[in-house]
Image (cartoon, grey):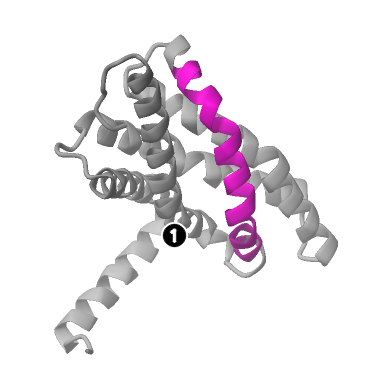
Amino acid sequence: MSLSKSAQRLMFRSLQTYFLELYTNPLRTKSVTSAVIYVLGNFTSQRISGAKAIDRNSLLAFGAYGLLFGGSIPHYFFQWLEWLIPGTSKLALVKQILVQRLLFTPLYQLFTLYTISRLEGRPHRQAVHQLIPIYLPVLIANWKWLTALSIINLTVVPPALRVIFMNLVGFVWSVYIATKRRKASDRRAGGKGGSRPGL
């Protein structure tokens, strides 16, 4: 089934506008894109889990995280990485991948899990308590499943599109994180004899 000519023109114009915005306002464009993707990922996770009511607080927290940090931190990280390890030689690419996977990924994952809990209104102690049981499994899953995509991102994707590529991968990843957090929260709530809405 092919798209009509008017739909093709609309799609082409939308992509043209998006890439123009990406060129003229890269940080804003990446941040807004990240916010949309994080909200869609969280919403998808809630629907998959069979939640009877959508937790809007969680949607807002994921959206705020994407807007404030999901576009900006990777944007600046990739610039810093290019400055720290310039070049496109195989050795430079291996170093870039190692810095991203062994330094950036653990710190960014920790920051993400903690900050989303805080944006949902949890106090520091509760955010840390939620973080502890899921951090290592989430990090190991990230290393296991996303390393190949990170290599593709650094070796094939043009620098201007690396955050967007990471955000598209991040859609699936945000579904995973939201689901992992919800299951951990449900286990804790079940142990206390109660139930809590999905995270």
Name the image quarter holding the C terminus.
Answer: top left
**Label 1: element kind:** helix
Q: Which residue is mark 1?
A: 23
Q: Residue at x 39, y 34 (%)?
A: 183
Q: Position of residue 102 (x, y in %)?
A: 72, 42
Q: Residue at x 43, y 58 (%)?
A: 168
Q: Residue at x 66, y 44 (%)?
A: 80
- Span of residues in magenta: 127-153
Q: Position of residue 97 (x, y in %)?
A: 72, 53
Q: Residue at x 39, y 26 (%)?
A: 187
Q: Quadrant of residue 106?
A: top right
**172 in relation to 62, above or below:** below
Would you say 49 lies left or right of 54 here? Answer: right
The front one of 199 and 123 is: 199
Q: What kind of residue is marked 1?
A: Tyr
The front one of 106 and 84 is: 106
**186 in relation to 21, above or below:** above
Would you say 145 lies left or right of 180 here? Answer: right
Name the image quarter holding the N terminus.
Answer: bottom left
Looking at the image, which residue sits at the far right? 91
